[in-house]
Each structure stands twice: as structure tokens, then as C-alpha cells.
Image (tube, helix red, strand yellow):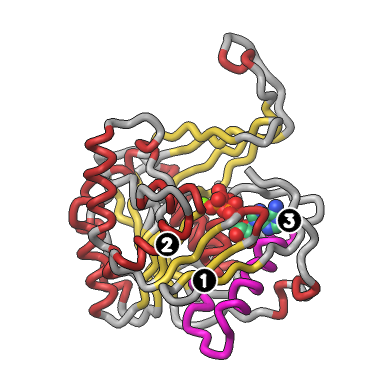
Amino acid sequence: MKTAARPGSRACAPKTGTVSFAGPPLCVVGNINRDIKVAGAPASPHLLRDGETSVSSIVETIGGGGANSACAAAALGADVRFLGKVGADLLGERLRLTLERQGVRAALARDPEQQTGSTVALGLSDGQRHFLSCLPNNDTLRLENLDLGALDGCGHLLRADVWFSEAMLEGGNRRLLAEARRRGLATSLDINFDPRWSGGNSREIRRRKLALRGVLELVDLVHGNRRELCAFTDSPSLPTALKRLIEWGAQSVVVHLGAQGAGWYSGSRWMMEPPCRAVRPIHSTGCGDVLSVCMILLHTRTDLSPREKLRLSNRVVRDFMEGRLDLIPELAS
Ligand SMILES: Nc1ncnc2c1ncn2[C@@H]1O[C@H](COP(=O)(O)OP(=O)(O)OP(=O)(O)O)[C@@H](O)[C@H]1O
Ligand SMILES: [Mg+2]
């Protein structure tokens, strides 16, 4: 949940329009599903009982961290490819059409055995969020579903939503990242939050963490917020988490720091950049994805310092939060 940021520096003044995000194509591999976004549901126990509750809005958009990131990158002017899986159903077709209209070149496997999934994103009046998900298409994603030829000619691979598919965790991610490296791509891994961290079996949690830690040597940019990075590395604090990620082989880390802004760590350098104050924010979810997409698209820009990249990325997030940048499209019918 976000709180209002303190006023940012004067460097925040220019609008996103001054930044170019064009560059070598980005390939995203991750979840794709429908998001049913419910806003303004009262945070009250009545919600858990029989009855009916009026809310301020219900909107149906494309969803999944991977698909959202691909859409955001395309809206920022990048050349984007997306690889993932849908069911052989109408919803899968609507999602494919939505990506296409957004300008994302999608190669979607269609699995007749699995339904395309949906998430109900419940936005409560006290600012808390709760996600109810059923994502069989994403849960069963396998390396064999991905057209790896799409990596050819790309500059960067983003692997998002790493915790959903067991087959990808147990070997698929390693092969995907190795294929990307072999083709000369830079690589990004969004750590995010394993749903099992809240109350799952501790041996399972450990096994899954070890599986993902084992691919860090193939990753140029690790992404996550403080809580996710500390939980993933079993660290008491962010500095320890960052140190461990580099020790385990990652090249650098992009840190989402909420109302404190964003950070970047490379093993020898740490820097933090305050946020750009969002006036009357209308979006509070997906900011991490947008920040990371910007850092990925700016990754090869040798004319910009890491601090300038963070600053530019913060500006884009501010514009997104204020609703001046439409990055996530509604679902095509
Ligand atoms: N209140 C805010 N005002 C201005 N910028 C913000 C604010 N909250 C977040 N940001 C910007 O958005 C970025 C990402 O947000 P955050 O750190 O909350 O990501 P997250 O925890 O991954 O959450 P999510 O991806 O669900 O939005 C921050 O690094 C910062 O640049
Ligand atoms: Mg996030």
C-alpha cells in the first residue's frame, strides 16, 4: 500500500514525454490473465457474510505481472515481445487481442487442457488489497510452451511471476535464462512474493527459494521491494539481502522503496533516489512493475548514470500514479 510521498526534488519537474524508451526489443515471459479490479470495497467483516455491497468501480483489464509489464513497456514506446500460455477459450483470445492492440508481439501457447485464469483484485477502502486468483494456464507454464526463437534480436529478457509454475522453477527458468544469455540478451528477474511465504509448508518454501537462488548467476538485474528481497534471502535487513543477492551471482538489484522512492545496488555501489510526489494518485498497484520496466528499458543507456535512470523511472511512475499515463489496457471484447 502506498502513502502520499513527500514532495520530490526539482528534478521531478519534467514530464515523462521528455524520455525515450525506444531501444532493442524487450522479451517478457510471465503470467497473463484477466484482472477484475474492484475499488472502494468497505473494509468490514460484512464482506465475509451473505449479502451485497456496492463499490465505487469494477473494471476488467489485462493482468499478470508479465503481461502488465509488456503492456506498460509498449505504451512507453518500446518494441516488446511476450511469451506465455492461455487456454483454448474466448478469454485467451480476448487477452491475445488486447496485447496485439497494445502493440505487443505475443506468441501465446493455447492449451486445450487448461482454462485461462482470472484474478479478482479487491481494493479495500482502508487502502489494503487482497487478490483472489485462479490461474491454471500460468500455473502449468512449461519451457516447451515458449517459442524461444522470439528471443533472437532482443536486447533484454524479463522473467516475471517466477513463483507460479513449478516446472519453470524446477529447471525451466534456468534453461530460459541460459538461452537468453547465449543469444547475448541482458536478463531481469522479478522476485516478487511467493504466495506460499504466507503460511505455506516451510520445507517447500525453502526448496522453492533454493531453486530460484540457483539461477541468480544468470541474472543481470534482480527486482523487488524491501519485504520481498528480505524474505527471499532470509535476511533481517535490506543491506544484508542486497549483499547476499550479489554473492549468489546477480549483477545488480533494482529496489522498489514505495513512498521512499527507488534504489539500485551493484555490489560496490548503493544509491537511493527519492520519489516524485504524486498529486491525487489514482493508481497504487503495479507501480513496482512500471518502475522496473523503466529501469530495464534504460539498462543499456550509457549516456545516463544509474541515478539519472532511477530519477527518470520515478517520474514515469508518478505520471502513471496520477493517471496521466495509460499503461494497462482494459480487456478487448
Ligand atoms: N507514494 C508514492 N509517491 C511517489 N512514488 C511512489 C509512491 N509509492 C511508490 N512510488 C514509486 O513506485 C515505485 C514502486 O512502488 P513500490 O515500491 O510500492 O512497489 P511494490 O512494493 O513492488 O508494489 P507494487 O508493484 O504492488 O505497486 C517506487 O520505487 C517509487 O518510485
Ligand atoms: Mg511489486
What distance separates the C-alpha of mark 1 from that of mark 2?
9 Å
The vertical placement of 68 against 202, above or below, is below
Identify the magenta region: 296-325
Residue 32, visible in the rendered structure: no
Which residue was labeled with disc 1? 270
- Find residue 74 and report its image quarter: bottom right
**Left or right of residue 139: residue 74:** right
Circle 2: residue type: Leu
Tell me the amino acid under the disc marked 1: Trp
**Residue toward you, 79 or 228:** 228
Q: Earlier in the sequence, mark 3 or mark 2?
A: 2
Splitting the image into four quadrants, where does ligand 1 fall?
A: bottom right
Instruction: Tell me residue 37's x, y (percent).
Output: 60, 38
Q: Secondary structure at mark 1?
A: strand
Q: Identify which amino acid the numbered label 3 is placed on.
A: Gly
Q: Earlier in the sequence, mark 1 or mark 2?
A: 2
Residue 323 - label: 3
Asked whether disc 1 touches disc 2, contact meaning CB atoms under 8 Å apart, the reply is yes
- In the image, is residue 304 part of the stretch drawn in magenta? yes
- Residue 54 in sight from this viewpoint: yes
The residue labelled by disc 2 is 242
**Is 321 above or below relative to 243?**
above
Mainly helix, strand or loop, the magenta region? helix
In the image, which is nearer the foreground, mark 3 or mark 2?
2
| Residue displayed at 44% across by 43% down | 91
Identity of the residue drawn at 42% across and 43% down: 90
